[in-house]
Amino acid sequence: MSDTAKSRAAALPHLRRGGLAKGDPIPLPLTMAAIFHAPGDATGFDQYGRFSNPTWDAVEQMLAHLEDAPCVAFPSGMAAISAVFFGLLKAGDRILLPSDGYHTTRALADRFLKSFGVAYDVRPTSSFLEGGFDGYRLAFVETPANPSLDICDIAAVAEAVHRAGAVLVVDNTTMTPFGQRPLDLGADIVIAADTKAPNGHSDVLFGHVASRDADIISRVTDWRETSGAIPGPFEAWLVHRGLETLDVRFDRMCTSAEMIARQLKNHRAISGLRFPGLESDPSHNLARAQMERFGFLISFVLASEDKAEDFINNCALMQAATSFGGVHTSAERRSKRGDAVPPGFVRLSVGCEPVEELWQAIEASLDAIGG
Ligand SMILES: Cc1ncc(COP(=O)(O)O)c(C=O)c1O
């Protein structure tokens, strides 16, 4: 971890300290309120739950501290992506998306943006730079992509996208601000599903948009207030609590993932192993250059759909579940979600269990399915 990441992590649980009066609770109070006391001119105060809420403010302050940029909170990662698209795009625009990233982002463009006159193209993450960006209003990358775990060079893409007069959005969900810093690498906007590692306990959906461009922040804030895509105060409170331990959990998960990926490499049942931290991974050199950690996601292929299901369902320390980034190790066979991967393709999200015990459980389940 770099020195700046360490000081960012150290200050995170103390952000509210300066605003505390004698007798105030140290943990964040939960403010469940649709209306606020607002006599006369209430400008500058909370007035109505669709405009603002003190619990959102606290979670946004934490996210802004982590991103080193103003942040706007949303009720899910997809709500954050929608805010960027619907807040910034207009009929006649053309956008570029990853062909191997989260499928719902493409579904949003296909099922909704298209009918509002916004066209889209797709390109693989590993060759995202090829073909240039002329004619695009916005390019959207996900790196490492879910589930391919391919990566692209954010700084190089940002430079080329800006040369073409477009805006670069990075979905940083798989990395969190502790693992990768797209705004520092030149991206205009970061979006993330805080549903994953930032909340970390798999009990809430949440998302945010971060940008150092005041106009972008103003447009997505206006979209949130006008469309009503607002986070609930209790969800914000849970994410605030989750963020307090993100550094510890993320560190454990990334360290364990490196160890487990090295063990998986030698297992006869595995092919097509992808983990950016492995020297043999096609993305390794770029990952070393642009990521602060290698993440907690690993993907690989087992011989068949049945073997992959047996591996996941019979591993004592693994939850069969979609999503990732929770304290529990979980895995999913991604072809069942429609991703263009082989039937035996498994995306593994390494959790916070002690790593020796976790590896023993994974190895036992792999041994049981045979080579
Ligand atoms: C990379 C990525 N971005 C965005 C999302 C959407 O997040 P949410 O499910 O919170 O809407 C997901 C969900 O899995 C994801 O994997």
Image: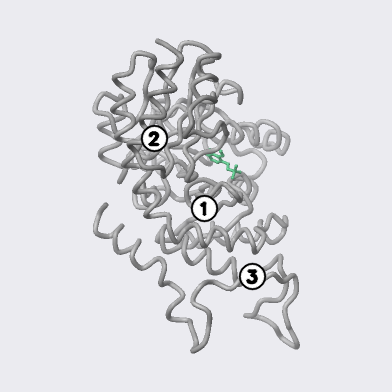
Front position in the image: 247 or 77: 247
Disc 2: which residue: 358
How are the residues colored?
one colour
Q: Nearer the viewer, residue 347 or 292?
A: 347
Q: Is residue 322 above or below residue 79?
A: above
C-alpha separation, residue under disc 1 versus residue under disc 2? 22 Å
**Which quadrant of the picture is home to ligand 1?**
top right
Query: Mark 1 or mark 2: which is in front?
Result: 2
- Image-quadrant location for residue 65: bottom left
3 and 2 marks in contact (CB < 8 Å): no
* Kind of residue at disc 3: Asn
Circles 1 and 3: CB atoms closer than 8 Å = no
Q: Earlier in the sequence, mark 1 or mark 2?
A: 1
From the top left corner, tell me how far across and down residue 236 is, in percent. Answer: 59, 61
* Front-lying residue, 116 or 306: 306
Q: Secondary structure at mark 1?
A: loop
Spatial CA span between label 3 and label 2: 41 Å
In the rendered image, residue 114, in percent from the top left (x then y), is placed at: 68, 33
Label 2 packing within 10 angstroms: few (<14), some (14-19), many (20+): many
Which is in the foreground here, disc 3 or disc 2? 2
The residue beneath circle 1 is 199
In the image, residue 185 sits, relative to residue 274, either above or below, namely: below
Which residue is label 3 attached to? 53
Q: Is mark 1 within 8 Å of ligand 1?
A: no
Q: Position of residue 194 (x, y in %)?
A: 53, 50
The reply, left or right, for residue 269 in relation to residue 196 is: left
- The kind of secondary structure element at disc 2 is helix
